[in-house]
Amino acid sequence: MSTNDIRTIIEGGRARLGIEFGSTRIKGVLIDPAGNPIAQGDHEWENQLVNGIWTYDLDDAWKGLQDCYANLAKDVQEKYGAALTKLEAIGISAMMHGYLPFDGKDRLLAPFRTWRNTITGEAASALTERLGFNIPQRWSIAHLYQAILNGEEHVPQIRFFTTLAGYIHWQLTGEKVLGIGDASGMFPIDSTTNRYDEGMLASFDALVADKGFPWKLKKILPKVLVAGESAGTLTEAGAKLLDPSGALQPGALLCPPEGDAGTGMTATNSVAPRTGNVSAGTSVFAMIVLDEALKKVHPEIDMVTTPTGKPVAMVHCNNGTSDIAAWVKLFTEFAKLMGVEASSNKIYGALFNRAMEADADLGGLMAFNYFSGEHITGFEEGRPLFARTSDSRFTLANFMRTHLYASLASLKIGTNILMDEEHVKVDRIYGHGGLFKTKGVGQSILAAALNVPVAVMKTAGEGGAWGIALLAGYMADRALGVSLENYLTDRIFAGKVGDCLDPMPEDVDSFNAFIQRYSEAIDVERAAVAHIR
């Protein structure tokens, strides 16, 4: 498509926009009606640990959103000589789970509690036992019930609570709704009705009946919508929130706001049974669409849904590549000290490629990437840790591969439950996120970790922002009357499967040996948590 063709699409108001609030970056991707990315913008941000709570200031969320959009509009102007004044459809996505409670006057009652917190163990355990359904600590309902158990004063005042994506969408449209994938990380979903499980709602209400709260759970949860349904329009106030310059007109359709799990599935065409994807960034998680229910409840496995409501087994690990990023930052500082100027992408590429030269046993090195707690292995706090024996082979290659293995270790432990105990079958895993930007490296290590072929598409770096843009496009194209699976396969991906790597037997053996040593050394990490303050 020529530059003039794209300019015509933009000026005609036919472009679709996806914005995703990630852990460290707010990213916007603009696509054409065929789903091709045509412009992007972003904004970096970080969570803070405030009074023992991982949080983001909502003022920072709005400033970041506006900066992201401004950068995207600038990209449009520079590439196509067009002003971005009208959009056909918009989708908002963000990190799943967490806790944003509001009162009857729409005032925030408690600082945003993100998915990263591991402070709801008592509530999560009690709810899992009562509901007969695994409720992880980061789920919104666990945060609500923990606040009840803690006797927090704000709870009786709650009239609505939601996720970050649900909040942003609400402010842009006035609609208190949520896509079913994101909703499935707030409270369990009944995939036969594509609504919250009515029996579990009643059980929760009975559990807290003696508290005398002036609300029932269903009334304070966002309304559930599935992919393809309209979730409102951009209001005049919403347009000014997104674009304070006033250039953007109201009226764009919005699709149901989704979580990063659902957008990852969409961006990798992993929404049909026996497909799966792994998102590897600040956190790392695997999503596997099931063709039958699991045999039992596993505390390590979340049951969520695709954007259309199909059941999905999710292995979510709080800690992914943050420790690698910290080490790369250190190497970057050293390079500058030595007078070497290099982009972060070049340094990442050099270090990741060197990792491919490591010894099979990694020279005896060991690392734990726990910036925060990790429920897969039973940690409420974390301490990034690197250790070696006095006779270890301490080379750069072994060092980097050790940290790459560590970034996927918890994921490996969780997915072993699905593969070994539940005998879940997966034909192929699609990888996306920062770990896969260096060609072949993260891909081959993930294949070794899961012992499954791993494919990476050229769009892997676009990630969830592209995924939610596609969901916005699917909603805009709903007159086609096709399923999301067919829409993605036939219209967006058109047979593309990406570059696929099969697991190498020697790499599988190497990763399995690392996991054995990792499991034996995990008490060292527990000691670090206990004694390093």
Image (cartoon, rainbow, N blue to C red):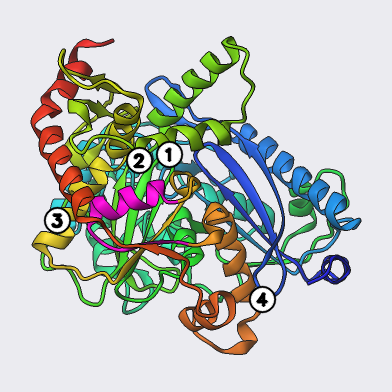
Mark number, residue 353: 1
> Which of pointers 3 and 1 lies earlier in the amino acid sequence?
1
Q: CA distance from mark 4 to mark 3?
A: 39 Å
Q: Quadrant of residue 504?
A: bottom left
Q: Nearer the viewer, mark 4 or mark 3?
A: 3
Residue at mark 3: 417
The residue at the point 42 percent across, 37 percent down is 352
Q: Nearer the viewer, mark 3 or mark 2?
A: 2
Mark number, residue 496: none
Residue at mark 4: 476
User: From what the image shows, is residue 6 above or below residue 396?
Assistant: below
Q: Nearer the viewer, mark 4 or mark 2?
A: 2
Answer left or right for 163 relative to 319: right
Residue at mark 2: 356
Q: Percent from the top left, x then y, of residue 519?
A: 11, 35
User: Can see residue 177?
Assistant: no
SS of the residue under disc 3: helix
* Label 1: how many Cα within 10 Å (few below 14, some 14–19, many 20+): some
Answer left or right for 498 relative to 298: right
Q: CA distance from mark 3 to mark 1?
A: 31 Å
* Label 3: how many Cα within 10 Å (few below 14, some 14–19, many 20+): some
Q: Which residues are magenta?
A: 440-456
